[in-house]
């Protein structure tokens, strides 16, 4: 049983979901994965369930929600799910579209294992490249990040 869980919210991610699941499971540290799917009409949940039953039983979990309830509530749902299972010491969140590099999970986990209370990855540090995002989304995300830093100090 692993002490680490990755929460991945999905909506219409059939093109990416199997790849991201396999990538996380191929890492040198064992992670469980919780997918929070918002009723994807493209069959995302079916792909996840097939992988769950045929290959990753006990490591891959899915929570299906009815309707597109949003990214923020998906993460909240996932964190509540994780916290109700007391064996997860490290809980991570990432997107299914590879806009977060699964390899970074190892460094983020190690930072916490070394004593950090929290470890946060950022798209905006030197050397980071945001993929699969239109420029408008990159700019919106960047300015939202600046705003949050300003408000929270």
Image (cartoon, rainbow, N blue to C red):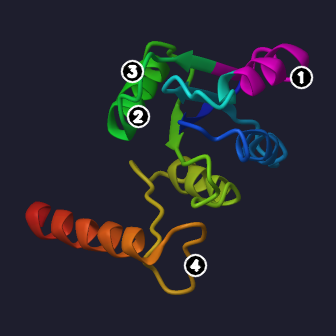
Q: Give coordinates of residue 149: x percent, y percent.
A: 19, 67
Which of the marked residues, 2 or 3, is nearer the chain's N terminus? 2
Classed neighbour count for the residue bearing mark 2: other residues with Cα under 10 Å, few (<14), some (14–19), many (≥20): some
Classed neighbour count for the residue bearing mark 1: other residues with Cα under 10 Å, few (<14), some (14–19), many (≥20): few
Residue that numbered label 3 is attached to: 80
Verify CB contact (< 8 Å) between mark 4 and mark 2.
no
Q: Residue at x 54, y 17 (%)?
A: 63
Residue that numbered label 1 is attached to: 55
Q: Give coordinates of residue 36: x percent, y percent.
A: 52, 27
Which of the marked residues, 3 or 4, is nearer the chain's N terminus? 3
Dot 3 falls on a residue whose secondary structure is helix
Dot 2 falls on a residue whose secondary structure is helix
Q: Which mark is residue 129?
A: 4
Alpha carbon of mark 2 to alpha carbon of mark 3: how far?
9 Å
Q: Residue at x 43, y 20 (%)?
A: 83
Q: Magenta part of the protein: which range?
A: 46-61
Dot 4 falls on a residue whose secondary structure is loop
Which of the marked residues, 3 or 1, is nearer the chain's N terminus? 1
Alpha carbon of mark 4 to alpha carbon of mark 2: how far?
23 Å
Residue that numbered label 2 is attached to: 75
Dot 1 falls on a residue whose secondary structure is loop
């Amino acid at each position: 049983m692993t002490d680490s869980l990755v929460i991945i919210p999905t909506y219409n991610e059939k093109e990416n979901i199997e790849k991201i699941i396999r990538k996380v499971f191929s890492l040198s540290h064992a992670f469980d994965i919780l997918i929070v799917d918002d009723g994807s009409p493209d069959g995302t949940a079916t792909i996840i369930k097939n992988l769950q039953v045929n290959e990753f039983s006990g490591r891959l979990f899915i929570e299906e929600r009815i309707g597109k309830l949003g990214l923020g509530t998906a993460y909240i749902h996932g964190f509540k799910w994780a916290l109700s299972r007391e064996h997860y010491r490290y809980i991570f969140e990432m997107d299914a579209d590879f806009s977060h590099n699964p390899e970074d999970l190892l460094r983020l986990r190690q930072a916490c294992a070394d004593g950090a209370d929290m470890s946060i990855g950022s798209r905006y540090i030197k050397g980071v490249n945001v993929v699969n995002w239109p420029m408008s989304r990159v700019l919106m995300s960047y300015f939202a990040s600046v705003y949050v830093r300003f408000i929270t100090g």
